[in-house]
């Protein structure tokens, strides 16, 4: 894998749940010498309760309002890598904040890869359904155009080997024109 790259600016990871945003984000931040944030983890730290609890008690709309507040705050930081929640792109203000404040990287993953990664994960409120595949397919159909709308870089995150995905991402970033 390439050595640490020194690059200015922010990098924001978007994509469906289970695409690998947090895992990739941590490694990317390390490789680029940046601070790492995960918007969902920041919400949990601030509220003291898991995202699933916020969904259960307050509903998705209230969670999205909390998320929008967190995105507005985090996108004002400098020299960070941010892993966002899968639904962050549903609000136009979030899409604008991400697009205007950093390089947006869409980790685009197949439904099969996401199902494999999330099959034992009970912390994904939108997947707690009889048919997780149908739910993911519906989410992909709704969200993929929004992810693509703001993505500066799209990486296939279906790859099962993390090292290959990271190598491809770092090579793409090195070739991406600086803003």
Image: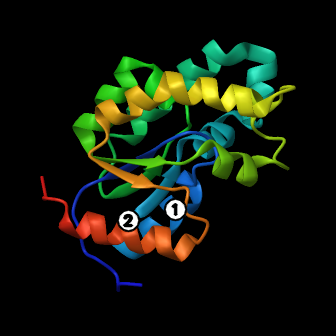
- The residue closer to the viewer here, 71 or 98, is 98
The reply to whether the C-beta atoms of the residues labelled 1 and 2 are less than 8 Å apart is yes
Q: Is 26 placed left or right of 147 in the picture?
A: right
Q: Is residue 69 visible?
A: no
Q: Is 115 placed left or right of 91 in the picture?
A: right
Residue drawn at x 34%, y 81% is 4
Quadrant housing residue 52: top right
Q: Nearer the viewer, mark 1 or mark 2?
A: 2
Figure check: 8 above or below 55: below
Q: State which tag comes first along the sequence, 1 or 2.
A: 1
Residue drawn at x 43%, y 62% is 35
Q: Is 12 placed left or right of 139 in the picture?
A: left
Residue corresponding to mark 1 = 24
Q: Is residue 171 visible?
A: yes
Label 1, label 2: how far apart the Cα atoms are: 9 Å
Residue 173 % position (x, y): 27, 64
Figure check: 171 above or below 69: below
Residue corresponding to mark 2 = 169
- The residue closer to the viewer here, 136 or 125, is 136
């Amino acid at each position: 894998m390439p050595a640490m790259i020194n690059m200015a600016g922010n990098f924001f990871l978007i994509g469906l749940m289970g695409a690998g945003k947090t895992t990739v984000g941590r490694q990317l931040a390390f490789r680029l010498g940046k601070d790492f944030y995960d918007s969902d983890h920041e919400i949990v730290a601030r509220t003291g309760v898991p995202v699933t609890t916020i969904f259960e008690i307050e509903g998705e709309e209230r969670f999205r309002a909390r998320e929008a507040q967190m995105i507005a705050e985090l996108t004002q930081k400098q020299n960070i890598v941010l892993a966002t929640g899968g639904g962050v792109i549903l609000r136009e203000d979030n899409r604008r904040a991400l697009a205007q404040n950093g390089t947006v990287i869409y980790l685009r993953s197949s439904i099969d890869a996401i199902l494999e990664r999330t099959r034992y994960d009970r912390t994904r409120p939108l997947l707690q359904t009889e048919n997780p595949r149908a739910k993911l397919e519906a989410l992909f159909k709704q969200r993929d155009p929004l992810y693509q709308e703001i993505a500066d870089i799209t990486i296939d995150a279906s790859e099962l080997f993390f090292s290959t995905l990271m190598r491809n991402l770092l090579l793409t970033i090195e070739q991406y024109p600086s803003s």
